Image (cartoon, rainbow, N blue to C red):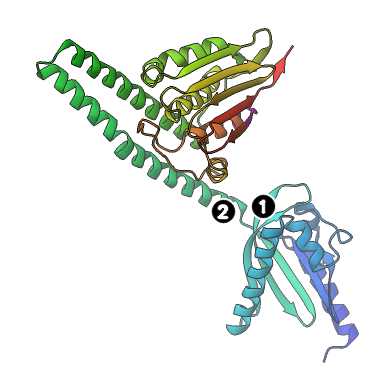
C-alpha cells in the first residue's frame, strides 16, 4: 500500500508530464466520497480555459463543459457505460467522444481518455474537432446529393410529363377553341409548378452547399410583390382568390433583393397552394414587418414545429398542387442568412399568417 509520500511523488511526476504533453489534461483525486480536480495542465488552461476554481469537482466540470442538460445527462450516461465496458474487458483506460463547451463559448469535439493510478485520475483530451467536422460535412454532402437526386428524379418528372402530354394533345388533336384555351391554362399552371420546383431546388442546393452569395441593396417590396403575383396570376385567378396588397412606402430596408424575392415567392406560392377556392390572401408591409396572411387550411402546432426543425414533408394543396416539402424550410434558412426574423402563426382550418421582420435604415 502506497504511503502519502509515494502519492505526493506520483502526483508531482504526473503534473510535470502533463505540462510537457501537447494535450489538455485534468488530474483528479478521490478523497473518500469526493472526486476533486487537483491539477489542470497548461494546455488545458490555454485551450479549454476553465480554472480549478471554476471546476473544482467532476460535477462542476460536467456543468461547465456540457451546459445543455439533456446533452450533459447523455454524456454522463455514456461515460458510466464506458467505465462498465472497460471493467468487463479489463482495460486500463476509458475513452469516449464528446463535444465540449470551452470557457470562451466555442464548442470542440474531443476524444476523452481517462485512466486511474492508485486514487489519482488522469484525463486527457485529444482534439478531434477537424475530423468530426469533416465527417459531418461529408454526411451533409451525401444527404444533399440524395435529396437532389430524389427531387430531380421524382418530383420534377411528374409535372414535366404532364406538360409533354398536354402539349402533345393540343398539337395533334382537333379540339375546339375553348378546349385549346383550357389546355393552355393547364400548360401555364404546370410550367409555373416546374419553375417553382426548379427555383426551390436550386436555391436549397446553393444554401446547403454554402454557395449562396448575399448582395445587399434597397428593397422595393411593392415591385417584388407585384412581379410575383403576376407570375402566379393564373394560379390564384383559377382559384378565384381575392388578393389584397397594402405596401407602406417611405422606409428603407437594405437586404439582398434576390433572396428577399425567393422568400416572398415561396410564402405567396404556399398561400395560394393552401387557400381554397374563393379564399383571401392579404399582403401588408408596415414599419419593418411584411405580413402575408391567408384564409387557407392552416397548420397544426406539430406541422409548424416540423418546419422550424427542418423535418416536415410535402403535402398537396387544396387543388392537389404538388410540392417538395422544402418551401418554408427554405424560407426559414434564408431569413436566418439575411438576419431577418421569421414567425409563423396558424391554426387548422383557420388560415396561416407569416411575418417577416426586417432591419430598416433612416
Q: Label 2 crowding class (10 Å Cα cut-off): few <14, some 14-19, many 20+?
A: some
Q: Is residue 160 above or below residue 129?
A: above
Relative placement, left or right, of 264 versus 168 is right
Q: Residue at x 42, y 46 (%)?
A: 142
Residues at circles 2 and 1 in contact by the CB criterion of under 8 Å: no
Q: Is residue 279 above or below residue 143?
A: above
Q: Position of residue 46 (x, y in %)?
A: 79, 52
Relative placement, left or right, of 256 versus 119 is left
Relative placement, left or right, of 191 versus 220 is left
Q: Position of residue 160 (x, y in %)?
A: 26, 29
Name the one closer to the observer, 350 or 206. Answer: 350
Q: Residue beneath label 1, please? A: 108
State the mark number for residue 171: none
**How many numbered circles does the render carry?**
2
Q: On the image, which quarter does residue 22 sit in? A: bottom right
The residue lying furthest to the bottom in this view is: 1
Classify the position of the C terminus by image quarter: top right
How far is the residue under mark 2 from the one under mark 1?
A: 9 Å
Q: Does the magenta-highlighted stretch encompass residue 139?
A: no
Q: What's the magenta region?
A: 337-342
Q: Please tell me whether mark 2 sits on a helix, a strand or a loop.
A: helix
Q: Residue at x 60, y 34 (%)?
A: 345
Q: Is residue 28 above or below residue 142?
A: below
State the mark number for residue 132: 2
Amino acid at each position: 500500500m502506497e504511503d502519502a509520500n509515494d502519492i505526493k511523488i506520483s502526483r508531482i511526476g504526473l503534473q510535470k508530464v502533463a505540462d510537457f504533453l501537447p494535450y489538455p489534461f485534468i488530474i483528479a483525486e478521490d478523497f473518500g466520497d469526493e472526486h476533486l480536480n487537483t491539477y489542470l495542465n497548461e494546455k488545458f488552461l490555454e485551450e479549454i480555459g476553465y480554472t480549478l476554481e471554476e471546476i473544482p469537482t467532476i460535477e462542476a466540470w460536467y456543468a461547465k463543459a456540457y451546459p445543455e442538460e439533456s446533452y450533459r445527462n447523455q454524456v454522463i450516461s455514456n461515460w458510466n457505460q464506458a467505465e462498465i465496458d472497460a471493467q468487463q474487458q479489463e482495460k486500463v483506460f476509458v475513452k469516449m467522444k464528446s463535444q465540449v463547451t470551452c470557457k470562451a463559448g466555442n464548442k470542440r469535439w474531443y476524444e476523452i481518455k481517462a485512466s486511474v493510478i492508485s486514487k489519482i485520475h488522469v484525463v486527457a483530451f485529444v482534439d478531434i474537432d477537424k475530423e468530426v467536422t469533416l465527417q459531418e460535412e461529408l454526411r451533409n454532402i451525401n444527404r444533399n446529393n440524395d435529396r437532389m437526386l430524389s427531387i430531380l428524379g421524382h418530383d420534377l418528372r411528374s409535372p414535366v410529363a404532364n406538360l409533354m402530354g398536354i402539349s402533345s394533345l393540343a398539337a395533334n388533336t382537333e379540339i375546339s377553341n375553348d378546349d385549346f384555351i383550357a389546355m393552355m391554362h393547364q400548360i401555364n399552371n404546370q410550367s409555373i409548378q416546374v419553375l417553382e420546383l426548379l427555383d426551390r431546388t436550386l436555391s436549397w442546393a446553393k444554401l446547403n452547399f454554402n454557395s449562396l452569395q448575399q448582395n445587399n441593396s434597397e428593397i422595393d417590396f411593392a415591385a417584388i410583390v407585384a412581379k410575383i403575383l403576376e407570375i402566379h396570376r393564373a394560379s390564384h385567378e383559377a382559384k378565384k382568390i381575392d388578393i389584397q396588397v397594402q405596401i407602406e412606402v417611405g422606409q428603407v430596408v437594405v437586404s439582398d433583393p434576390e433572396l428577399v424575392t425567393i422568400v416572398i415567392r415561396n410564402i405567396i406560392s404556399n398561400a395560394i397552394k393552401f387557400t381554397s377556392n374563393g379564399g383571401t390572401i392579404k399582403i401588408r408591409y408596415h414599419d419593418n414587418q411584411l405580413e402575408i396572411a391567408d384564409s387557407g387550411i392552416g397548420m397544426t402546432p406539430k406541422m409548424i414545429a416540423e418546419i422550424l426543425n427542418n423535418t416536415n414533408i410535402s403535402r398537396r394543396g387544396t387543388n392537389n398542387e404538388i410540392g417538395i416539402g422544402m418551401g418554408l424550410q427554405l424560407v426559414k434558412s434564408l431569413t436566418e442568412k439575411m438576419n431577418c426574423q421569421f414567425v409563423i402563426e396558424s391554426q387548422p382550418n383557420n388560415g396561416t399568417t407569416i411575418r417577416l421582420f426586417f432591419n430598416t435604415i433612416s
